Image (tube, grey):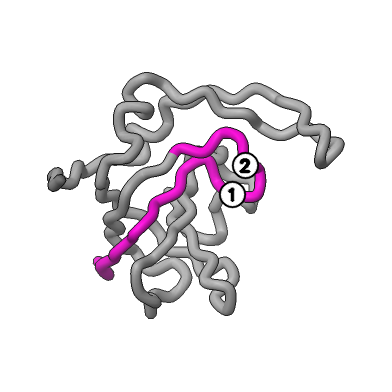
Amino acid sequence: FCFSQKNITWQDLSKIKFTDKYFSEYDDYFMFPTFSDSVKALEGKQITIKGYFLDVVAKENIYMLSKGPMASCYFCGQGGPESAIELEFVNKQNFKTDNIVSITGVLKLNKDDVEHFNYILKECTGKLLK
């Protein structure tokens, strides 16, 4: 079936709480998310969000969208996991790190797979804004 895309903001995705949870297969604790009802309502929906494109491992097509540029992204200690989205594109993208982009895709919420982000956008398409 067809559904329209919903424009969301980083504020919408900030409605999440984290607790430390032990994962025996890694013998370590990870931040375990509890998504609010408003975030859960977005799962499986096509959404559009603006942010900074980060080319994490281009050779392996590992990309993310961040609330802030590379110098102030989640991995550099700024913000939490809710300020980054893993991107799975339909086609290869030519965006560069820190390009401001608008990304549309189907939102998947991830709370158990520590190999991936809490937010994943599947079937992504993107548009360069600046």
- Residue for badge 1: 116
Q: Residue furthest right?
A: 27
- Residue for badge 2: 113
Q: Residue furthest front?
A: 1
Q: Is residue 71 left or right of residue 19?
A: left
Return the x and y of residue 28 as percentages of the image width and height.
82, 36
Q: Residue at x 52, y 23 (%)?
A: 34
Q: Is residue 44 left or right of residue 35?
A: left
Q: Is residue 98 magenta?
A: no
Q: Is residue 108 above or below residue 50?
A: above
Asked if the residues shown at circle 1 and circle 2 are in contact, with their CB atoms under 8 angstroms apart, the answer is yes
Magenta segment boundaries in residue numbering? 109-130
Element under disc 2:
loop
Amino acid marked by disc 2: Asp
Q: Residue at x 72, y 25 (%)?
A: 21
Q: CA distance from mark 1 to mark 2?
A: 6 Å
Element under disc 1:
loop
Q: Residue at x 86, y 36 (%)?
A: 27
Return the x and y of residue 64 as percentages of the image width and height.
48, 58
